[in-house]
Amino acid sequence: MSDIILHPNRDFSVVRRHPWIFSGAVARVDGVPEPGESVQVISSDGMPLGTGAFSSESQIRVRMWSFDPAVAVDDAFVSDRIARAVGARAVFLGDGATNAFRLVNAEADGVPGLIADRYGDWIVCQFTTVGAERWKDVIVAALQRYFPCRGVYERSDVEARAHEGLPQTTGVLAGEPPPERIEIVENGCRYQVDVRAGHKTGFYLDQRDNRERIKRYANGCDVLNAFSYTGGFGIAAVAAGAASVTHVDLSAEALALAKSNTALNTCHVEESSFIQGNVFEVLRTFRDQGRSFDLVVLDPPKFAESKGSLMKASRGYKDINLLGIKLLRPGGVLATFSCSGLMTPELFHKVVADAAVDAKRDIQVITRLQQAEDHPEGLCFPEGLYLKGFLCRAG
């Protein structure tokens, strides 16, 4: 096994059990590790700190598998990590509320670079690092062993793989290919999911708890579902008795599926409208027309892809929240989110507050929102809390 020797005073984060070691912390590499190969991490004074997966391409040079230097990373180790992650989701099997949830959440479950989501009888995976890629066969076998399914499908068509020197790839890894649409159930609502070409692995499973939460504010309300994708928040609102829902999204394909999902839930389609267009421009038009809503949901895509784009992203988040707040009726409720990992909760709070100031509206925070409980975060890995939001009431 090759050794990764750290610079003096650069081992603090590893000692604190943070799973990432950046290239700038590495003094030298003793050996010639292959991409994804396990390496031993050693402090500048010779103390073994644990074992991780090596990447020569990424700025994150090592992703830690274990902080115990005595642990061997082998088939049994990786299989055990999968077993523990799947076992932790047993609560979702017992309550019957949903048949779609995350089985493995990367670093939080001790498997850096692996996302595994259950959709009915299929598992959909993303392998975003060379470490996870190297153990792909073992991981797939373990998923089938601990969570029997009809098939395992890969959606590793993400830009993150380029940073690891990996090509994008999709396809069947085991068992049967998934159908064009998989129907899932979530808290009484039904959704058709395109796991082959939809966003992420097909659906925003991380918003499950938040879709359920907004139901209590939807009865009898006019709802704006901005960046609606396939209709998740809007359909939850109609199921809770919303008077009307306006879905707005740039994608015609996503809106077509939103309309199908609306019909699937026997919701009256005439109570739901579907508007394709640039969400910023559509909301500006609503503002100029004097339209208003009782409940506004803002769930935009990731605006900040890098630290260099964070300032521009902050302006985008402020602009969309300014529009959303201006469209709220007195006493109306705003559910607003950022899924950009680089956008800290503190910065997002400031952005939304600045939007409220510019809108000249008094806004109170009802509660703070985050990703669903099947998307845990490591306590020593704050980057794992990527989804943050606020549920607010307008004065």
Image (cartoon, helix red, strand yellow):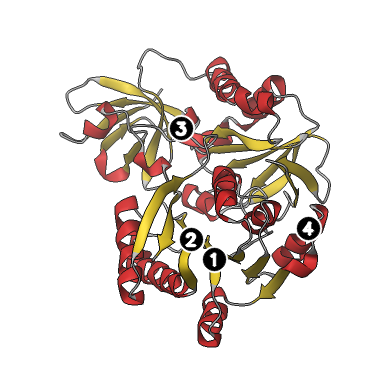
Estimate how packed mark 4 is, as few (under 14), some (14 to 19) or many (20 or more) residues with alpha carbons within 10 Å: some
- Indicate which label's residue lies in the foreground, 3 or 1: 1
Q: Amino acid at mark 3?
A: Ala
Residue holding disc 3: 108
Q: Residue at x 31, y 44 (%)?
A: 23
Measuring from the top left, give residue 267's x and y in whole percent: 78, 58
Q: Secondary structure at mark 2?
A: strand
- Give the spatial CA distance, label 2 vs label 1: 6 Å
Measuring from the top left, give residue 166's x and y in whole percent: 55, 48
Of 8 and 360, the residue lying toward us: 360
Q: Residue at x 29, y 22 (%)?
A: 49
Q: Amino acid at mark 4?
A: Cys
Measuring from the top left, give residue 16's x and y in whole percent: 27, 29
Which circle's residue, 3 or 2, is located before the other in the chain? 3
Residue holding disc 4: 267
- Quarter of the C terminus within the rendering: bottom left
Residue holding disc 1: 294
- Indicate which label's residue lies in the foreground, 4 or 3: 4
